Image (cartoon, grey):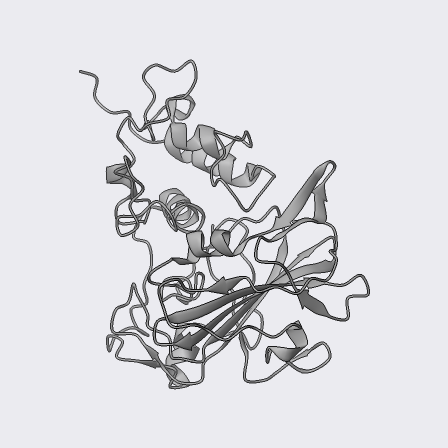
Amino acid sequence: MRALLLPALLVLGATPGTAKAPAPPRLLSQTGLYAAPGVVAARNLAYAPQYPLWTDGAAKARWIHLPAAIDGRDEAGWVFPVGTKAWKEFAFGGRKVETRLLWKTGPATWVFATYAWNEAQTEAVLVPEGGQPDAAEVAPGLRHTIPSRSDCRDCHGREKVEVLGFTALQLSPDRDAGALHAEPLRPGMVTLKELAARGLLRGARPDLASRPPRIEAPPAARTALGYLMSNCATCHRGDRPIPGLDLDLRPAHALRTALGPGSFPVPGQPESRLLSPGHPERSALLHRMASRGAIAQMPPLGSVRVDQAAVEHIRRWIAGMAPLPSH
């Protein structure tokens, strides 16, 4: 995510196929995030998902404003109240580069906006609909691009928008000790338990606090499946099918759907599969994670650096699996 950018004035956009949404404010300071310059308003709750998305090693901070309770009857698909605002701040090298806003303005209407921080780090300004290249250097010769409106929709959903990272599993107090790039829960951060205690979650199952959600798997698999959920399953999932792919990388489905041959064979590996137990070298999923080539890279956007820690963990996980029986 790239060098500090020039202020610009356009909106990242609203959910398609809905009533016209209001334009977001021109300045981040006008969105309701701050009570005073640099001071986050008390009504905005800080949080940290247990399985964060990899964004080239960016330091992140997140807040959410809930004007009413979330409808938690569907544990996998929370319904947020109108007026919900979620912010996500990205920093590289100790400097804030961008802050993204997701704002629910109607029952089926969401506004997406991204704000670019100025050189003085005193304010952030709305960026164009098409995003902003060259926002920050993340490694020698590699630079971060602030995403476009279309990129935001690709991840958060076009018909049913989700607040990624703010889910029952992501906020579960039963946190994965091995989660890759895990961020510490700092004092004041909200978890599932605090959300319920504040009356901000209604309709959830009665034993949610005593039996919070978790990925039921051995430690290495739990961590791997959590990582794939955050970094891959926003696109690769059964309710957002990609034409020609029967692939769902959500934890309950990943091992079943990833054992097929896939449509992207590993070069030089005629027996490759999407995931080949016992054979990392034959696993297209791992090959594409480790690539930043224009065609092979997965995820296809959002990063310019390979997540080496994740590649090594997934490699060990696949290597430790029992190979499939030969025919």
Identify which residue is drawn at 39% across, 62% down.
16
Q: Quadrant of residue 9?
A: bottom right
- Name the foreground residue: 225 vs 66: 66
| 206 left or right of 311 in image | left
Res. 52 visible in picture: no
Task: Locate residue 74, reporting x and y percent.
Answer: 25, 69
Residue reaching furthest to the right: 120
Quadrant assignment for the C terminus? top left
Identify which residue is drawn at 70% across, 67% down.
124
Q: In this view, does 171 lie above or below 235?
A: below
Res. 170 visible in picture: yes
Task: Locate residue 232, reporting x and y percent.
Answer: 41, 45
Q: Quadrant of residue 200?
A: bottom left
Q: Is residue 146 above or below residue 254?
A: below
Residue reaching furthest to the front: 20
Task: Locate residue 322, reporting x and y percent.
Answer: 29, 28
| 175 left or right of 324 in image | right
| 138 left or right of 162 in image | right
Task: Locate residue 324, reporting x and y percent.
Answer: 24, 25
Identify which residue is drawn at 24% across, 39% down.
256
- Name the foreground residue: 190 vs 81: 81
Report how many numbered discs are placed on residues in the image: 0
